[in-house]
Amino acid sequence: MRRTKILEAKRLPQYTDGFIEIYDIVDKKDGDFPARAIVKRNIKPIWFRQLAVFDHTRITFEQSDKEVTRKVAIPMWYEGIGSDCVVMVNGRGGQEKVFNAAFVTSKAGFRETELTLVNPSGKYEVLDVNEG
């Protein structure tokens, strides 16, 4: 019986709920007025596991005029993912802004990054990596 518990604790997390593509928010150099746009990072899509968003969290965000769209966990990510990033989920083109990235250790002992995603205040123009 004890051997079974040890094996269960070492089971790898499954990231099978979907995937995200990461975009960096940049200043667009066009015309007299600066604008914000996004540029896709040159990395493969990252698979995630959906996390629950509790009512208390939703209420707290709504009080600051932010709508939490989802919370996801991805394998530990060190490459500067944070509030200056936008993600697109499952290649559908809908933009979700990263509000927060928290680096945690799961109950099974695996290091993960939990992303809280919110609706952006407006839709960002997607730039080619050579633009900007």
Image: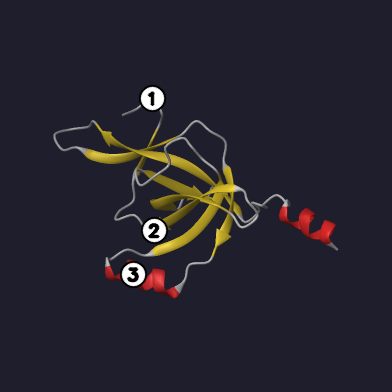
Tell me if 4 is positioned left or right of 83 in this view. right
Inspect this view and state whether residue 113 appears: yes
Q: Which dot, 3 or 2, sits closer to the camera?
A: 3
The span from disc 3 to disc 2 (Cα, nearest Å) is: 13 Å
| Residue at horizontal 53 percent and vertical 66 percent from the top | 52
Q: Are the residues at dot 3 and dot 2 in contact (C-beta closer than 8 Å)?
A: no
Which residue type carries mark 2? Val
Q: Badge 1: how crowded within 10 Å, few (<14), some, or many (20+)?
A: few
Q: Secondary structure at mark 2?
A: strand
Residue picked out by circle 2: 118
In the displayed image of the protein, which residue is found farthest to the front?
A: 2
Which residue type carries mark 3? Thr
Note whether 55 is above or below 76 in the view shown: below
Q: Badge 2: how crowded within 10 Å, few (<14), some, or many (20+)?
A: many
Q: Which dot, 1 or 3, sits closer to the camera?
A: 3
Q: Which mark is residue 130?
A: 1
Residue picked out by circle 3: 60
Q: Position of residue 63 (x, y in %)?
A: 28, 70
What quarter of the picture does the C terminus occupy?
A: top left
